[in-house]
Image: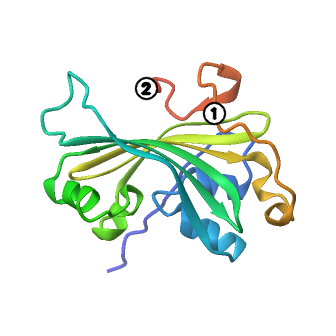
Amino acid sequence: MPLPTMNTSLSLPDGFSGIERILLTANGNLQRLISAYFNEVVTVTIVENKEVPLHPNEDPAVLARFQREVNLLCNNKIFCNAKSQVLIKDQEVYDLVVKDGVGIGQIFRYLDKLPSFDLHGLGRTDRTFWREYSLKIPGVDCRLLEVFPSTLSEDGWLHAPDEEVCWDVEMEQDDNIAWVNPDLEVK
């Protein structure tokens, strides 16, 4: 009996190159993809990583909320700025992060769990392209905004002089946004 065929498809708006589409749909493996693309080591610099107070209406299962910002670098050059909110609902995960010092971004690999991936929005500004998405496993919910320089896939980018990039994306400007799900609001 022949095995059934399985098709995978994800259609993104026009205006993104092949490598940009790959980065926009990466599900927790962005560092590995960029390392392979440039054949260089990727490092992470933590800008902010702090436990913040829970919201008054927070799900009672939430043990902790973390606010995080990191820069991802290749050859000492920033290729991505990532801001995230992380909700931890599992005591083992909380202990790994708080007591054992495991980085929030490494939890999925550390626990050997493939997170679910939901792409909420993506777009482009004059100098950047970006995505907003969620990664989830039981006990951990992450909502992330990642911003990349538009010139990332140009020949010689890795060794070119640094350029001025604004890592803050103005979400209210509709001309910068190409929503994957127009009914979903950015929170």
User: What residue sits right under mark 1 in the picture?
Assistant: 168
Task: Tell me the kind of residue under disc 2.
Answer: Lys
The answer to which image quadrant residue 30 occupies is bottom right
Looking at the image, is 9 positioned above or below residue 38?
Answer: above
x, y percent for residue 61: 13, 39
The answer to which image quadrant residue 179 occupies is top right
In the rendered structure, the answer to whether residue 9 lies left or right of residue 85 reads right
Q: Residue at x 63, y 66 (%)?
A: 34
For label 2, the SS is loop
For label 1, the SS is loop
In the rendered structure, the answer to whether residue 10 lies left or right of residue 52 reads right
Among numbered discs 1 and 2, the one appearing first in the sequence: 1
In the rendered structure, the answer to whether residue 56 lies left or right of residue 182 reads left
Between the C-alphas of marks 1 and 2, the distance is 15 Å
Q: Nearer the viewer, residue 168 or 131?
A: 168
User: What residue sits right under mark 2 in the picture?
Assistant: 187
x, y percent for residue 88: 24, 47
Other residues around mark 2 within 10 Å, as few (<14) / some (14–19) / many (≥20): few
Q: Residue at x 60, y 47 (%)?
A: 81
Q: Residue at x 19, y 46 (%)?
A: 89
Residue at the limit of the structure toward the bottom, as seen here:
1
The quarter of the image holding the C terminus is top left
Q: Is residue 77 visible?
A: yes
